[in-house]
């Protein structure tokens, strides 16, 4: 299935100049517009349904791995025996076979849910289950403010689906000097980050060798996913939430928000970031 499709739209403009040279409202008629795909993606484990997420059908094996890992459904990539993307009526099934030990743990969790677009906490049965606490990340990363800005300025050049549709979030893995190494996109910000983490796991990247930049706000769930993957710094182009800041402080993650060309705010553990180049 394609990650986008073309549709016919009617184009209306206010204050446009018409054929007579006068300004006013104008309907230009029909034109093609590119729309990002969003469809149900069902994740099943050992032939048992677990969750249905609304996602973009792109990099789905990365999504399966990243979601499984950040949700604590597997402990490592080796716990997944196989992944198959199976077209279904109206959507896609990601059929995974995981180790019996991890499947037994999954069977005790009783977490079946239907997620909205990338909804990370829908269906959690209680507050304790919703607010999970992975072990604190290590403190080995050193970056510069210049490196962070280098990634911010370059992000839009690595989001082809966003450039085509204007409807997707991006999650970028960046080297410690700010070079963007790889990006994943999705209509859901959580999905984009899960895809990125899955791609990192499958590619053998060292989570301590760089940082994550996301084209969204920094919610608790985004910081949690970074911490669960051992990532020491996450930077968001929009604002963090109070819970995201609190969780970053507890988990040892450096949280950077309002990351725009020429500016960003550091909300936790600024000692990882220096002036000048690293």
Image (spheres, rainbow, N blue to C red):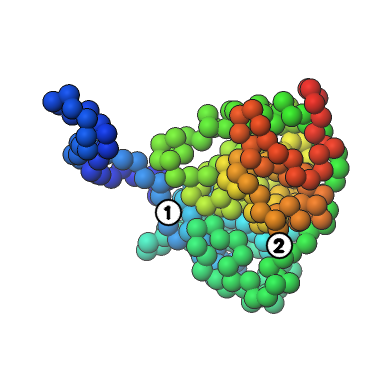
Please give left or right for residue 172 compared with residue 20 in the image. Answer: right
Tags 1 and 2 touching, CB below 8 Å: no
Q: Nearer the viewer, residue 21 or 80?
A: 21
Looking at the rendered structure, which numbered label has been put on residue 38?
Answer: 1
| Quarter-of-image position of residue 235 | top right
Looking at the rendered structure, which numbered label has been put on residue 19?
Answer: none
For mark 2, what is the residue?
72
Q: Can residue 70 be seen from the camera position used here? A: no
**Residue depicted at x 78% and y 31%:** 143
Residue furthest to the left in view is 20
Q: Is residue 255 above or below residue 176?
A: below
| Quarter-of-image position of residue 76 | bottom right
Please give left or right for residue 55 compared with residue 7 in the image. Answer: right
- Per the image, label 2 sits on a secondary structure element best described as loop
Tag nearer the camera, 1 or 2 = 1
- Binning the other alpha carbons within 10 Å of mark 2 as few (below 14), some (14 to 19) or many (20 upward) gives some
Q: Is residue 257 above or below residue 39?
A: above
């Amino acid at each position: 299935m394609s990650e986008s499709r073309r549709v016919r739209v009617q184009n209306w403009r206010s204050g446009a100049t018409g054929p007579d040279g006068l300004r006013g409202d104008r309907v230009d008629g029909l034109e093609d517009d590119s729309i990002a795909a969003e469809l149900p993606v069902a994740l099943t484990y050992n032939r048992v349904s677990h969750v249905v997420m609304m996602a973009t059908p792109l990099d789905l094996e990365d999504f399966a791995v990243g979601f499984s890992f950040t949700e604590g459904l597997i402990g490592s990539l080796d716990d997944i025996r196989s992944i198959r993307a199976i077209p279904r009526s109206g959507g896609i099934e990601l059929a995974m076979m995981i180790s019996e030990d991890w499947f037994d743990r999954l069977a005790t969790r009783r977490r079946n849910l239907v997620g909205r677009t990338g909804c990370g906490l829908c269906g959690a049965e209680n507050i304790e289950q919703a607010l999970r606490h992975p072990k604190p990340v290590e403190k080995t990363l050193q970056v510069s403010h210049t490196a962070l800005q280098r990634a911010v300025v370059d992000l839009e050049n690595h989001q082809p689906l966003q450039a085509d549709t204007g409807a997707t979030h991006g999650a970028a893995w960046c080297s410690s000097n700010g070079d963007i190494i790889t990006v994943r996109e999705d209509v859901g910000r959580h999905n984009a980050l899960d895809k990125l983490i899955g791609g990192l796991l499958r590619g053998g990247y060292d989570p301590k060798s760089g940082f994550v930049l996301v084209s969204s706000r920094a919610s608790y769930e985004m910081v949690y996913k970074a911490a669960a993957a051992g990532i020491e710094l996450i930077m968001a182009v929009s604002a963090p939430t109070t819970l995201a800041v609190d969780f970053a402080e507890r988990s040892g993650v450096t949280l950077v928000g309002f990351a725009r060309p020429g500016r960003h705010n550091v909300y936790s553990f600024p000692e990882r970031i220096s002036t000048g180049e690293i």
